[in-house]
Amino acid sequence: MKKYSKVFKGTAFSSKSPKEVQILKDYLFCINADGMIEKTISPEEADYQILLDAYENKENFHCLAHGQYFLPGFVDLHVHAPQWAQSGNALDIPLYDWLNTYTFPLESKFADLDFAKNVYEEVVSTLLANGTTTALYFATVHKEASLLLAEICAKKGQRGLVGKVVMDDPEQNPEYYRDADTETALADTEEFILAVKELAKSTKQGVYPVVTPRFIPSCTDEALKGLGELAAKYDTHVQSHCSESDWEHGYVKERFNKNDAFALNDFGLLREKSVMAHCNFLDDDDADLFAETGTAIGHCPISNAYFANSVIPIAHLHSKSVDIGLGSDISGGFSPSLFDNARQAVMSSRMLEDGVNPKLPAEERGVPNSRITINEAFYLTTAGGGESLSLPIGRLAENYTWDVQIIDTSLTSAKLPIYDANEDLHDIFQKIMYLTRPENIREVWVQGEKVHSRN
Ligand code: GUN
Ligand code: FE
């Protein structure tokens, strides 16, 4: 019989398609030395008992207790790691003022590596404790501190995709917080890419460098062009903010006489491995361009409720074959939990469909067919995130990574309301999605290694 590095037994939930959740009841998951799921075996299969006989009670056999379930680890497509230090603050002011009054002064402090270490250690641990096994991070303009964030992800076992932020335009960015000049911004980005690629060799789960123009308003044309070239040269991921708010979207329209999507594409920044945060004002041509180029949307529903001046039509964009995942957008979004963001994604979509202006008759209030289900929100946090990043993550299936969270529904301190021993597993899944708190997340594994546990 084939030897596996680890074997796990338990009931798991995994997305089959955006609308359908697959229930893998009492499955065996056989993990190889690389941390990949090599084989999944259902109780009906012939080798189930043979494998159980060989592995049960061995050290590398892990069996879930009653009331525990596997979910795929979550994929956060948009996190500003330094902004963890201001999560929950100043959400009542518009984006432009929030950036200039709070965010840029905070991010400028990450020139200090001791300060950076403190915040970055805590944000990575906090995300892991909330079930996030892969995160696409904005760091700051500082090359050294950005590399430190990648090192902390590597050390803590999280799959971190990290970007040194580029903000080179002296007209648009404050003197105390920007790249020294365009040439330095590009040289620092290239050095950062090479350093993270080197660091990745010493990790099992992988860490990745990301080309990161903050958003069009912060960058000169030369920087945007140079970043597009670096992304192509090193085949990296790319991230930015795209068509987020009235102010930002309007600024780009005035500068280029086109929407963000076409402007970014002109600079080579829409690629298969690109993820654009927000995208609230994408029109149908923009969406087609996203689908053609393989660019994904990082949907940030909590942040959008504060800064976006609109609600993104997720169901419509999905119907146009655009890849979409979820982002917390810490700290535009206050919560580090993708459970919270999945819940908000459902609620926002329902408000878009039903409308909120009581002066209009019900049938004229909203946008038909906008609502998404909790199954679709689960897809966005898992498989959708994996597809957006072009990585084999987000599903509990063969040839995917063993990235999981073990949810305990029966803790006395945080018990989920399950009273029927034979409750339908779809109902239990919904309760898990709506009611899980960090206390219920007992263990988190990335690439076959345990990276968080709560005793
Ligand atoms: N646009 C440019 N920078 C930011 C940021 O830090 N947060 C959000 N939400 N939007 C931005
Ligand atoms: Fe953001």
Image (spheres, rainbow, N blue to C red):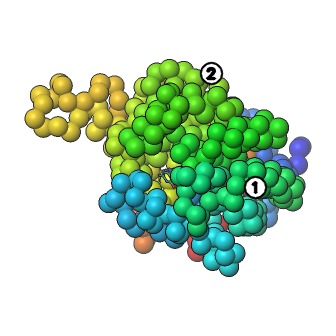
Q: Quadrant of residue 139?
A: bottom right
Can you name the residue that lies furthest to the front here? 171
Q: State the quadrant of the N terminus.
A: top right
Question: What's the amino acid at mark 2?
Answer: Glu
**Residue 197 seen:** yes
Give the mark toward the camera: 1 or 2: 1
In the rendered view, tell whether residue 277 sits above or below residue 421. Answer: above
Residue 35 x %, y %:
79, 51
In the rendered view, tell whether residue 175 sits above or below residue 283. Answer: below
Name the residue carrying label 1: 184
Q: CA distance from mark 1 to mark 2?
A: 32 Å
Taking depth in this image into account, of 333 and 75 the one nearest to the observer is 333
Residue at 64% of width from left, 39% of height from top?
221
* Horizontal relation, residue 190 to residue 419: left or right: right
Residue at 41% of width from left, 53% of height from top?
95
Residue 318 x %, y %:
49, 27
Q: Are marks 1 and 2 in contact (CB under 8 Å)?
A: no
Question: What's the amino acid at mark 1?
Answer: Thr
Residue at 63% of width from left, 65% of height from top?
124
Name the residue carrying label 2: 292
Mark 1 or mark 2, which has the lower sequence index? 1
Residue at 25% of width from left, 30% of height from top?
366
* Horizontal relation, residue 354 to residue 104: left or right: left
* Horizontal relation, residue 72 to residue 194: left or right: left
Taking depth in this image into account, of 168 and 322 the one nearest to the observer is 168
In the rendered view, tell whether residue 79 sits above or below residue 83. Answer: above
**Residue 444 seen:** no
Where disc 2 sits, the SS reads helix
